[in-house]
Image (cartoon, rainbow, N blue to C red):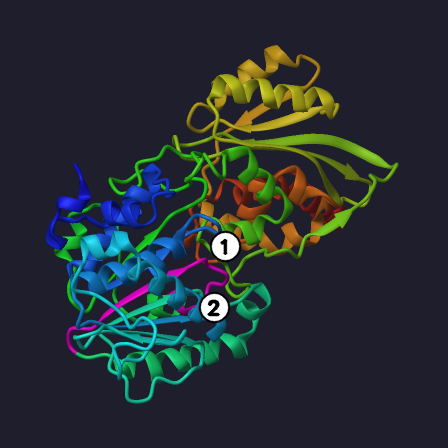
Amino acid sequence: MDIRTNSSAECSFSDFALRVYPFLELSTFHQTYYRILEAYAQGRIRKLIVSVPPQHGKSVGATILLPAYLLGLDPDMRIAIASYSGTLASKFNRRVQRIIESREYAEIFPNTTIKQGTKPAGYIRTSDEVEIVGHKGELISVGREGSLTGNRVDCFIIDDLYKDAMEAQSPIVRENCWEWYTSVVRTRMHNTSRELIVFTRWHEEDLIGRLMNTESVRQLTTFSDIDNVRDDEWLYLNFEALKASSATEVDPRNEGEALWPKQHDKRVLLSKRKLDPQRFEAMYQGHPASREGLLYNDSFREYGNLPRDIMKRGCYTDTADTGSDYLCSIAYAIDTDGTIYVTDIVYTQESMELSEKLVAAMLAHNDTRIAYIESNNGGRGFARALQRAVPHTKIEWFHQSGNKEARILSNSATVLHSIHMPKNWHMRWPEFYTHITTFKRLLKANAHDDAADALTGIIERELGSVERRLQRIKFI
């Protein structure tokens, strides 16, 4: 289909993008992203939040191409672009202007033009503000905390209010952002105004987090959500760099699949996660966690070398309950003081057939003498297979009947006090590290509790028996 023969009403946002940016490559993810942005442009969505990982084209779509498309559809629309600095916001504005003055744009939207040279007189065109010739429309750019006095806004696009992690971690900066949003952005809105927030997440209490805690926000999982959302309700879509949540109609990827594999494949993303799991979880996965409300955070004691006086080498395994759960198997050593040193971990969502081999290899490598296996949900068969694979390790299976939430919470302080991690544990087991250091006290807020459950199990099996022996000694 030749887009040049289309009227503006027939030109989809994706077609428009490819016409004015012929070098653009739209992956499956981008096609979905642009489909949702088109629904926003059509007015079917009034309040939209999209969280996208770095370097995945969020700004090209939402902050450069979309304003040009909106002004083409409605030359009377008044649009504001905001970012963490006026310089960046002006850069977005200039790029939109270059699109509007292109030949390709004129073929699609001939009624939307801007001042060129000294004519027509009376119309504004700067890097911060441009007006549509013959219409009421304009495009304004503003930095965070900038003023918009007297300007009515029909569409507000906010792209990254925080420059970096340091700003996002500052309570003062976050509060200033919130104050600017409520006192400037919201005061320029009217009954039919639209808002679009596109962010890379940095902190649990960033602007997106604050809105999710104070206003009605609906997760965008099916395209029918677009037609069912209320005018006062936000639609929220988080694109994870590596799929970790359940598949949906909007994002049907399988767990572990990369969002844009041609540019950021799984190998590259895993290497980034290995360097800094917590930051990766926020920036690339869209799941930031503040230190408030965490059960463990990063307070574990670390060790360089094992002490010489090791009295026991054991392992605790919590087999996966469901397909989305992790098998968590932790090998450890205990010294004469009862301190527990984690030496190796298998933390995987692979099938039992593969995880059996991984755990068996770990037991052999760590010279494990006894391994405790929870027999729930197939654990007994897993234990039997391990016993055949590592006959020199005593395999002991048992049924775990205790309340998981009570067990994890009541043993959390002992876990932090008694279990030591190797210094490079965030590099060796990044998923395990992330799930533990971001684990919340409110258990239902966690996607996975397998790591916390296994650490709790070690404490119960080892230190619990020590306490009982001490009680017997005192009684005697």
| Circle on res. 282 | 1
342 up-or-down from 208: above or below: above
Q: In which quarter of the image is residue 268?
A: top right
Q: Quadrant of residue 372?
A: top right
Q: Earlier in the sequence, mark 2 or mark 1?
A: 2
Q: Nearer the viewer, residue 230 or 65?
A: 65
Q: Which of 378 and 25 is in front in this view?
A: 25
Q: Tell me, yes or no, if residue 251 can be seen here.
A: yes
- In the image, the segment drawn in magenta is 191-208
87 up-or-down from 334: above or below: below
- The residue wearing badge 2 is 88
> What amino acid is labelled 2 in the image?
Leu
Q: How busy is the neighbourhood of tag 1: few (under 14 within 10 Å), some, or many (20 plus)? A: many
> What amino acid is labelled 1 in the image?
Ala
Which mark's residue is nearer the viewer, 2 or 1? 2
Report the side of 388 relative to 259 (left or right): right
Q: Nearer the viewer, residue 432 or 403?
A: 432
Q: What element carries label 1?
A: helix
